[in-house]
Amino acid sequence: MVLGDWESAIAKLPDDACIVGVDEVGRGPLAGDVVAAAAVLDPADAIVGLTDSKKLTAKRREALSEQLLARARGVALGRASPEEIDTLNILQASLLAMWRAVDALGLDPDLVLVDGRQLPRWEYPSIAVVKGDALVPEIAAASIVAKVARDNYMCEQHLLWPQYGFDSHKGYPTAAHMAALKTYGVTPLHRRSFAPVRAVIEGD
């Protein structure tokens, strides 16, 4: 399945079905990994407040991520590096990160619900859900875990490259990031296939 009625699909599953939500963070930045998460919730231990990670404050995301890591039936991360992004393109790298996240769960999904319109090439019964991070609790959970994990990762990179301000913009093309790129050049963390980075490399 690609696009479909996810609510009907869930209704047909047994109560103990393994329903996996998947989302990714980091398609837009000029630097850093794209990070995906896969999450399986425990119906007997509901976590209140799950929604699109972009609608939550950083503090609330972090608190929910901690709850998910402690109480969810399963949570796993998958990543694709800047080199893989440059080789595959950002869409395919994002799908690869999603595949790695689900694979890392070590579970046998009855249904995988993926945010967006594209599905990785896998054998799992799957549905792509547009705006799924705001509609499906499992996808919302994945979006929160992925966002917190990527933000933490970019803060770690800031310690290696403090002049770029990765702790504030997380690699997105802000004015401060563009100014740092032009002043200090390109790091191994940057995605060389992205036009603004390529322009710096070529001296435009």
Image (cartoon, rainbow, N blue to C red):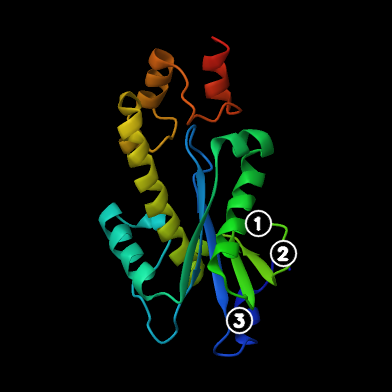
Q: Can you tell which mark lies on residue 117?
A: 1
N-terminal label among 1 and 3: 3
Q: Hey, which quadrant is residue 183 in on the image?
A: top left
Packing grade of label 3 (10 A; few <14, some 14-19, many >=20) is: some
Asked whether disc 2 touches disc 1, contact meaning CB atoms under 8 Å apart, the reply is yes
Residue to which mark 2 is pinned: 2
Point 63% across, 86% down: residue:
13
The amino acid at mark 3 is Ile
Q: Hey, which quadrant is residue 115 in on the image?
A: bottom right
N-terminal label among 2 and 1: 2
The amino acid at mark 1 is Arg
Q: Is residue 41 above or below residue 173?
A: below
Disc 1 secondary structure class: loop
Q: How many marks?
A: 3
Report x, y in % for residue 56: 33, 57
Report x, y in % for residue 77: 49, 58
On screen, residue 172 versus residue 67, left or right, reads right
Identify which residue, 77 or 111, lies in the foreground: 77
Asked whether disc 3 touches disc 2, contact meaning CB atoms under 8 Å apart, the reply is no
Point 34% across, 40% down: residue:
156
Disc 2 secondary structure class: loop
Q: Is residue 198 above or below residue 14?
A: above
Point 37% across, 53% down: residue:
148
Packing grade of label 2 (10 A; few <14, some 14-19, many >=20) is: some
Q: Which quarter shows the N terminus?
A: bottom right
Asked whether disc 1 touches disc 3, contact meaning CB atoms under 8 Å apart, the reply is no
On screen, residue 54 versus residue 136, left or right, reads left
Report x, y in % for residue 37: 50, 59
The amino acid at mark 2 is Val
Q: Is residue 181 above or below residue 47?
A: above
- C-alpha separation, residue under disc 1 versus residue under disc 3: 18 Å
Residue to which mark 3 is pinned: 10
